[in-house]
Amino acid sequence: MPAALLIAGTACASAATAMTYRLPAERPVALLPGPDRDLAAGICSACHSLDYITTQPRGKGAQYWKDSVAKMVTVYGAPIEPADADRIAAYLGATYGAMPGDGQGR
């Protein structure tokens, strides 16, 4: 390598300034109020962010949420007792399954 390139490269490297990054402020994710909200939040957040729930499209209905909870158990091995799975699915279906403004969701 020619000496001039080596010197130029060294000068550029020493003139570089360190970059600093600031991550956006995190906001806690809270589920909407309803019966068994705390049960759903506690069990679901053991494996994934509650954003997974709150960012799902609305209006898919109660069956979508029942199937989603069943998938968490059967496919991903979530340790949810059947009675708790039913309660969580009912909460999610009632709270997130309806379209906003139709009087069924919160």
Image (cartoon, rainbow, N blue to C red):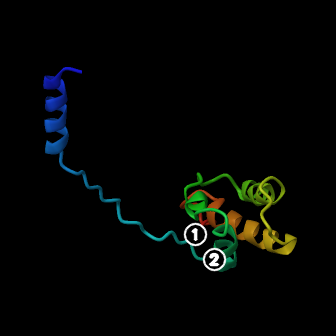
Percent across and percent down for residue 16 are: 18, 44
> Rounded to the nearest whole Å, what is the CA distance between mark 1 and mark 2?
8 Å
What is the secondary structure assignment of the residue under circle 1?
Answer: loop
What is the secondary structure assignment of the residue under circle 2?
Answer: loop
Q: Quadrant of residue 66?
A: bottom right
Q: Nearer the viewer, mark 1 or mark 2?
A: 2
- 16 horizontally vs 24: left or right: left
Tell me, yes or no, whether the two marked residues, 1 and 2, touch with CB atoms within 8 Å.
Answer: yes
Which residue is label 1 attached to? 106
Label 1 neighbour load within 10 Å: few <14, some 14-19, many 20+: some
Q: Nearer the viewer, residue 31 or 98?
A: 31
Identify the mark at residue 45; answer none if there is no mark. Answer: none
Which residue is label 2 attached to? 34
Q: Quadrant of the C terminus?
A: bottom right
Identity, as a three-letter code, of the amino acid under mark 1: Arg
* Residue ID at (19%, 20%): 2
Label 1 or label 2, whichever comes before in sequence order: 2
- 7 horizontally vs 35: left or right: left
Percent across and percent down for residue 7 are: 14, 31
* Residue ID at (59%, 54%): 56
* Residue ID at (58%, 65%): 50
Percent across and percent down for residue 30 are: 53, 72
Q: Quadrant of the N terminus?
A: top left
* Residue ID at (86%, 70%): 82
